[in-house]
């Protein structure tokens, strides 16, 4: 008779709701117009270089070109989180979720971003609600 517990008995499943930032930003998969694609590429390069103001400006220009593109609002929300502007990030993620129509993957990521932004604002009850909404997608 073995005294070694089965692996399922020794490992607790990790709960994403117990971590402060349980989401990984998703990558946009929607094809973009050449102009918007260039702006998003510039924003990504600027963000990686630490120039968040230029990255934000590029994303805002892209949104002016494609104002109904939910992925652009999501990317701008991520930049606002990096700029320590969680309230703005939350508002942009809500707009992205509204524009996402039938893209449930994007909606889920938007609500996870909202949950994280709310945690940063010390709104833990609101974060829990946002996570529950994300789990519905």
Image: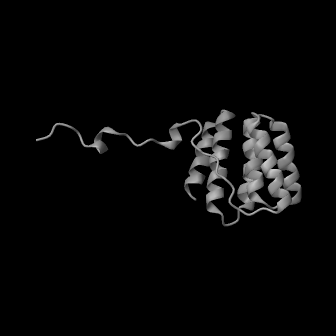
Picture coordinates of residue 8 (x, y %)? 31, 45
Query: Relative to 74, does residue 3 appear above or below in the rendering?
Result: above
Look at 85% across and 54% down and name the residue there.
62
Query: Relative to 20, does residue 75 appear above or below in the rendering?
Result: below
Query: Relative to 33, does residue 9 appear above or below in the rendering?
Result: above
Residue 69 located left or right of residue 131: right
Image quadrant holding the N terminus, namely top left
Q: Is residue 88 visible?
A: no
Look at 70% across and 56% down and name the residue there.
97
Picture coordinates of residue 112 (x, y %)? 62, 47
Image quadrant holding the C terminus, namely bottom right
Q: Quadrant of residue 66?
A: bottom right
Residue 133 located left or right of residue 98: left
Q: How is the image coloured?
A: one colour
> Count the marks: how many?
0
- What residue occupies the far left of the structure in this picture? 1
Q: Quadrant of residue 113?
A: top right
Residue 56 located left or right of residue 110: right
Picture coordinates of residue 32 (x, y %)? 78, 62
Q: Nearer the viewer, residue 87 or 2?
A: 2
Look at 73% across and 38% down and name the residue there.
48
Picture coordinates of residue 98 (x, y %)? 73, 59
Q: Is residue 15 visible?
A: yes
């Amino acid at each position: 008779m073995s005294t070694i517990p089965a692996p399922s008995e020794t490992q607790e499943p990790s709960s994403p709701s117990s971590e402060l930032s349980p989401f990984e930003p998703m990558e946009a998969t929607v094809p973009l117009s050449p102009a918007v694609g260039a702006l998003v590429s510039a924003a990504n390069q600027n963000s990686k270089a630490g120039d968040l103001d230029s990255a934000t400006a590029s994303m805002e220009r892209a949104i002016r070109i494609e104002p109904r593109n939910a992925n652009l609002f999501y990317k701008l929300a991520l930049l606002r989180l990096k700029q320590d502007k969680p309230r703005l990030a939350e508002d942009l993620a809500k707009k992205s979720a509204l524009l996402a129509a039938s893209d449930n993957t994007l909606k889920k990521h938007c609500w996870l971003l909202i949950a994280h932004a709310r945690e940063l604002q010390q709104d833990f009850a609101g974060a829990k609600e946002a996570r529950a909404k994300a789990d519905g997608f």
